[in-house]
Image (tube, grey):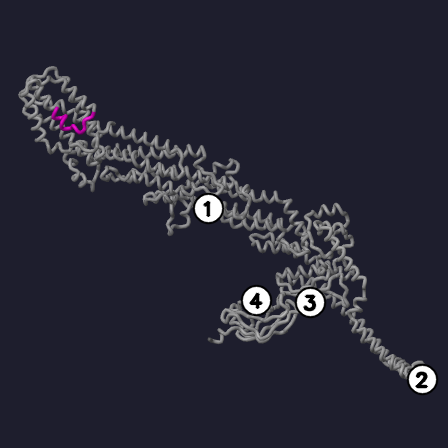
Amino acid sequence: MSRSRQPPLVTGISPKEGAAWTKVTIRGENLGTGPVDLIGLSICGHNCLLTAEWMSASKIVCRVGPAKDDKGEIVVTTKSGGLGTSTVSFKLLRPERIGILDQSAVWVDEMNYYDMRTGRNKGISPLSLRPSNPLGIEIDKCKILQSDMELTFPGMSGDFTSENFSATWYLIENHAGSSFEQLKVAASNLKKQATKKNEGSLAYVKGGLSTFFEAQDALAAIHQRLESDGTERVEGSMTQRLENILNRASNTADTLFQEVLGRKDKADSTRNALNVLQRFKFLFNLPLNIERNIQKGDYDVVINDYEKAKSLFGNTEVPVFQKVYVEVETRIGALRRLLLEKLLQTPSTLHDQKRYIRYLIDLHAPGDPAWQCIYAQHKWILHLMQNCREEFICGQKVLDLEGDAHPLTLGRLSHTVSLKGGSSLRTLRASTQHFETPQQVQFVEKLSDVVIGQLPNFWKLWISYVNGSLFSETGEKSGQMEKSKKNARQRQNDFKKMVEEITNRLVKLIRGALLPTTLPPGERSDYGGWENKAELTGAWLTQIIHTVRSCHEALSAMEIPNDLLQVIQDLLLELRVHCLMVTLLHTTEDVKRLTEKVDWVVDNKGITNLPSQFEKCIVQMLQSLEEPLEIKMGETNVLLLDQVQDQVTELTVTIMKVFINCLEQLSTKTDGDNDAAHNIAVDLSSPDQFSSIQEVFSPTFEQRLLIILSNCQHLERRTFLNLVEHFEKHGFTGTEKITRESVDAVRELDRKLFDAYIERRADPIAGSLEPGIYAGYFDWRDCQTPTGVRNYLKEALVNIITVHAEVFAVSKDLVSQVLSTIVESVSEEMCRLMQCVSFFSKNGALQARLELCALRDAIATYLSAESNSSFKQALDALPQLHSGSDKKLLEELLNTFKSSMQLQLTCFQPSSVQPVKR
């Protein structure tokens, strides 16, 4: 492995011991290739990576944290080398804190700790080290309002360091739930503390016995030496001589160094004065330091210095200090105004807002900066929302002034194009330009972005204001937090009105763009202005519904109360209903245009593409309505609203009837090239010939009638049933009424078209019978012996066969219905003609019976009860055949007719389809 991949090794640390937050230098090998490579550093088990500064591969500087272990290794971890080892250790020193009730041999000015936020050592007063539990038992906080305690104990305090300390207040506040036994233990603890205090300096004597013993030994040795001499009280003794020598030395020294000592006293006085000046250098330099730190943005330093100066010199009576302190207050006042200006400046982030609010609270700014910020943000959000509308309204006027370069409404244009492409969804191509999206849609999307982007931070700021997290949670700020919570409770209704105003403004702006008629007349000028824009299609409205729903879901996720968001729910309901109605109306227009797509090409059942196109159009309409009809949490099913049910049912029935009217228009449309006398026998008698002409098919009037008849039957039997299933699947109500009225309308059209076709085909056939019968001056009273069926009857049969071929080429299902009706018309005409004859000769009666029987037998498959009755009445009108030869001749002639016309009569062979009575 290369050297860069060796595990880190710590070989030295300086210093090797120290208190928490001591800055140390770590040296070793393979300590990483850079700051990014260093991923772990622990000393005595405490993670010190946050304060680590990578200097080189052999040197790292960091601060030791408050580890649990008193002594431990230094472990470095890098990406390149992994977990390292150490050959040295660090000893963590734990300084003993001295409380305000503890006696000390030295003066305790302050104790330092390291502030991670500012990277500086800060001083804290010994007062902050006061014991949190002087009774020595478990604290049981009681939730009693501070105001109630102040009323109960006027002028007293529960703080045991206060001059007005009330023991009863303290016990109620901190030990309301403590038992009597626990209070007895607390009393015992207090007695022990009092006894310890009464011992006074005796405790220090006991603690310093070794020092006293050493002093006692020295004094005893001196005393013993003097006693051994025995001359301590004799004149001229050693002791006396020593005292005289010391006195003379003292006098001589005073004489020699009097001037020097005088200068020394003056120097000491000067030095003391300089020490005083140096001691208060902090105050004299504070105004300049405040200005510099404000310019650098070190507001934390300014606040800490100000707090320190205020505690030291806030109540000073020294004129010089008062003058300097007034200058400090002037600079702090300017800082308050600067921070307030930054706080109210928009736009700003939530982090900056909280930071400036904390600064202002720490600086004891007048008023309530947090509420001022909330109010400013509220006005800013309303301003953004109104500007959003103004931007699009002005843009609309500019486009109007540019002329009619794009006269078609893009929404309807995309609607039409999508229909021709087989889709009712108005999707936009990726290459379309920005303005192709309707401005109302762009406006709603941008307005929702504004609300979603601004309201969450606005709500979070309020929550922070309510729970007090805007302020520092140290003991010094507890009173400020309570005050903030109290202010927040008083302003809950005001904030609720702010949120209501924002949501109401959002709803009114959207209504003005999409549903202007739902606004009061007095507000339409403020929120409307979209009159020149065409109505949006269902697809664009669906996109808007999706946008508004996303906005509502985002606001609901913030745990905003539902009553504040109810106006958005109401707007969503109206938009969904509006989208439903618009989609149904536009579908009606789409159905009308289906006539432009007909190609008259039929399948083997005589069905064109119209029913499938109609069903596809309805299905795509229902698919486009899936999102508007979807029921999200807290929403209402629009199809269950009584008024909506009636409107939807009526519009759906209208769509059905519009399509039926389209079929009727197609059936009556005529082409100039079509000839009513077109030779159908030649063109349509063979299905092969019919299929061969479909390539250039231009149907005649009769063919149109048959094709539309076939489509009507398909609608009734299949299409309507399929559509009812789709309607029910999507939750539509009133399907019974839709089915009933649609079926009635299509049956009425079917009847009209059928009667028209029968009139066009049956009347010529029935009308040709009488001229054919009496052609060549034929007379029933004087005619020759029958030799066969006459040509008029054969011609009538050929015409019926022609109709059969025409109908069969379009739809086999219509053959029985059409031919049965034509046969009824022919049979009625034959019955009338026979009943009008006053006298039949023998040959005439035989000829008439032959032709009636031949016609009846040829079309027997399509005889109905009415047809059989007409033939029976016609035969009853003829004289009966009594001669056996006549009956035999009749039978022979019938057989001859059937044999000669066998090929032509093949189409009349019985089939599985029975005649249908219309």
**Which residue is located at x 21 percent, y 38 percent?**
698
Precedes in sequence: disc 1 or disc 4: 4
Point out residue 729 in the picture as x, y percentages from the top left corner: 38, 39
| Numbered label attached to residue 95 | 3
Return the residue nearer the eye: 264 or 304.
304
Precedes in sequence: disc 1 or disc 2: 2
CA separation, marks 3 and 4?
24 Å
Q: Give residue 789's quadrant in the image.
A: top left
Mark 2, mark 4: which one is toward the viewer? 2
CA separation, marks 3 and 1?
62 Å
Q: Is residue 314 above or below residue 668?
A: below
CA separation, marks 1 and 4?
46 Å
Return the residue nearer the eye: 686 or 575.
686
Residue highlighted by disc 4: 49
Point out residue 162 in the picture as x, y percentages from the top left corner: 76, 55
CA separation, marks 1 and 2?
117 Å
